[in-house]
Amino acid sequence: MNQILFVPNDYQGKNTNITSNVRKRKRIFILPLILGVTVAISSYKIYAVVSNIQEEKSNTYIQKSEENIQYNNIEVNNTQKENQIIVELNNNINNQEEQNNIKNENNVTSTKTQSQNITANNTKISSTYKASNGKTYKVIANLNIPSLGIEYPVLSSTSDALLKISLNKYWGAKPNEVGNMCIVGHNYEDSRFFGKLNKIKNGAIVKITDLTGKTLDYEVYDTYTVGPYDTDCTSQLTKGNTEVTLITCNKDGSKRFVVKARAKI
């Protein structure tokens, strides 16, 4: 016998209410979830944008800092230009291989200097120089450029203090010997030392007298301007020639004026 189950009317209504309540609860649960996800995504995007802005500001600050450092370095260099006749030349000139080449050249061409044009000079120069400050300094040669009226003793070494006294030997061969003797001097506005050196012409004569009294005539064959860190002019590879290089700074101290001269044969 089949049984028919009856669901009371009031129970059917309750079931409908339960379903409706469940749906409402689901909606109430889903809505905050959607809002939470939306907020999280938005927060991440805002964080990414802020991070990019901060990174750009940081890079800009670093760049400006580097520019300021470079500017300050330039300012420091400009204030010291009077003492910048030679800047960082020691970095390149102490090359052992080059020195070995010099020795080889000297051995091969030691007799060559005997045939060079030597001016007899019976008056030996003094090996010391007494400056106006009362101090005495060691001298290795005397330099004379007749066309410019330049004549000064060449001191045996180089320093900021010595550059204020006279011309200095910076590097290279001994006076009137095979190689390249490099002489430096300040470019003063009152024409002292190498103040007029920039007026020299190719073909001009530079006379170097050593402590034995021997004078060699050197003929200028090149003049040019280089940056403060260019050391090529100090090279000792002269192919067996006896040369002298004169170095001074330009008017604002930013570059170097170089004069190359070779002993006349």
Image (tube, rainbow, N blue to C red):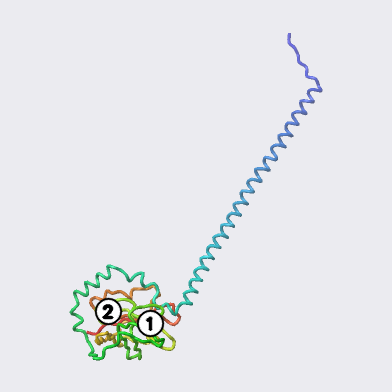
Residue 20 in the image, given as x and y percentages of width and height: 75, 31
- Please tell me the numbered disc located at residue 243: none
Q: Nearer the viewer, residue 23 or 133?
A: 133
Neighbours of disc 2 within 10 Å: few (<14), some (14-19), many (20+): some
Q: Give me the residue at 27% from left, 67% from top.
A: 97
Residue 170 seen in the figure: yes
Look at mark 1 in the image and give the residue it sits on.
185
Look at mark 2 in the image and give the residue it sits on.
174
Query: As shown in the figure, which amino acid type bears the numbered disc 1?
Result: Gly
Q: Nearer the viewer, residue 154 or 59?
A: 154
Query: As shown in the figure, which amino acid type bears the numbered disc 2?
Result: Lys
Q: Nearer the viewer, residue 22 or 213?
A: 213
Q: Nearer the viewer, residue 94 or 246?
A: 94
- Earlier in the chain: of badge 1 and badge 2, it is 2
- Relative side of 57 to 18, left or right: left
User: Would you place residue 162 above or below residue 12 in this image?
Assistant: below
Viewport quadrant of the C terminus: bottom left
User: Would you place residue 54 above or below residue 125 in this image?
Assistant: above
Residue 55 in the image, given as x and y percentages of width and height: 56, 57
Residue 198 seen in the figure: no
Distance from disc 1 to disc 2, alpha carbons, whole Å, reads 17 Å
Number of numbered discs on residues: 2
Q: Give me the residue at 45% from left, 80% from top.
A: 252
Q: Quadrant of residue 145?
A: bottom left
Residue 2 in the image, given as x and y percentages of width and height: 73, 10
Q: Give me the residue at 34% from left, 70% from top.
A: 92
What is the residue that sits farthest to the top in this orientation?
A: 1
